[in-house]
Image (tube, rainbow, N blue to C red):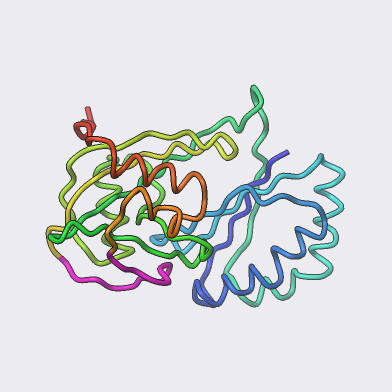
């Protein structure tokens, strides 16, 4: 059984709340045998979303009671609101798809821009994020890259399309080049840098298997034409 948890931030910064998640909320769930599937930060709305997997309804109810007794007052002091919704299984998976995009972006030295996110500090990754409702994919990746890095980009095409079956996430990769702007950290970005990315050094930076696969495709595959919004 999957549950979507949403935190709306207003009283603390993303970095402070991320520390609270890792030090208090996540360990609480892990102790109660709840599995974290994935998490996202929607910068424009200052919302953190997480997907958790419970064994069944009784398991969920038990954990909720413990949560309210131990963490509720602390949570209320740190955020504007907290909510959850059930995501029911259909055909063995989550019956809705989240769409996200990323960009393998080069500078004039043919170096690739990579980042460390505050939500995933164990690995480097390409900048990107969730596609907003009714937002074209190419505009979404340009927006995400600008928000996270400060750079404007010109896109050359798509490098791959991926299905993250565990959370119903469709991921589209783009390749492009910097066209303007200036490097800057955002509220959700821990570190940014340019590297000479090659097959032999991908595993030194991209520590998650799915990120490494996407990085390899991005540098090896010829970019296909960008999709058209019709």
Q: State the image coordinates of residue 122 (x, y, percent, origin top left).
A: 53, 63
Image quarter in which the C terminus is found: top left
Quadrant in the picture for residue 44: bottom left
Q: State the image coordinates of residue 211 (x, y, percent, origin top left).
A: 45, 48
Q: From the viewer's perspective, is residue 89 above or below residue 12?
A: above
Q: State the image coordinates of residue 166 (x, y, percent, origin top left).
A: 60, 38
Of residues 129 and 68, which is closer to you in this image? 129
Q: Is residue 46 visible?
A: yes
Q: From the viewer's perspective, is residue 216 above or below residue 16?
A: above
User: Which residue sits at x=71%, y=45%?
Assistant: 53
Of residues 47 and 173, which is closer to you in this image? 173
User: In the rendered structure, does residue 105 fall within the stretch colored magenta?
Assistant: no
Q: From the viewer's perspective, is residue 12 above or below residue 107?
A: below
Q: Is residue 132 visible?
A: no
Q: State the image coordinates of residue 148 (x, y, percent, origin top left).
A: 33, 63
Q: Is residue 19 left or right of residue 31?
A: left
Q: Is residue 175 left or right of residue 209?
A: left
Q: Is residue 214 left or right of residue 178?
A: right
User: Which residue sits at x=13%, y=63%?
Assistant: 180
Image quarter in which the N terminus is found: top right
Of residues 68 and 111, which is closer to you in this image? 111
How many callouts does the rendering have?
A: 0
Q: From the viewer's perspective, is residue 132 above or below residue 123?
A: above
Outermost front residue: 200
Magenta region: 181-194
Quadrant in the picture for residue 226: top left
User: Which residue sits at x=79%, y=63%?
Assistant: 67
Quadrant in the picture for residue 109: bottom left
User: Which residue sits at x=24%, y=71%?
Assistant: 183
Outermost top residue: 91
């Amino acid at each position: 059984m999957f549950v979507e948890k949403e935190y709306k931030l207003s009283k603390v910064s993303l970095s402070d709340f991320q520390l609270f998640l890792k030090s208090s909320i996540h360990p609480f769930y892990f102790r109660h045998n709840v599995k974290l599937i994935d998490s996202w930060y929607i910068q424009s709305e200052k919302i953190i979303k997480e997907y958790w997997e419970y064994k069944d309804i009784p398991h969920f109810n038990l954990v909720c009671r413990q949560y309210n007794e131990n963490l509720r007052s602390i949570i209320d002091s740190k955020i504007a609101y907290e909510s959850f919704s059930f995501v029911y299984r259909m055909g063995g998976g989550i019956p809705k798809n989240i769409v996200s995009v990323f960009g393998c972006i080069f500078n004039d030295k043919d170096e690739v821009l990579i980042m460390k996110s505050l939500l995933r500090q164990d690995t480097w990754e390409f900048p990107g994020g969730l596609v907003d409702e009714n937002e074209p994919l190419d505009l979404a990746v340009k927006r995400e890259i600008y928000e996270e890095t400060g750079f404007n980009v010109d896109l050359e095409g798509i490098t791959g399309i991926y299905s993250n079956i565990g959370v119903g996430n469709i991921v589209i990769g783009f390749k492009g080049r910097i066209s303007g702007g200036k490097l800057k950290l955002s509220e959700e970005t821990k570190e940014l840098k340019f590297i000479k990315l090659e097959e032999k050094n991908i595993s030194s930076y991209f520590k998650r298997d799915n990120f490494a696969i996407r990085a390899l495709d991005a540098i090896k595959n010829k970019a296909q034409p960008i999709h058209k919004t019709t």
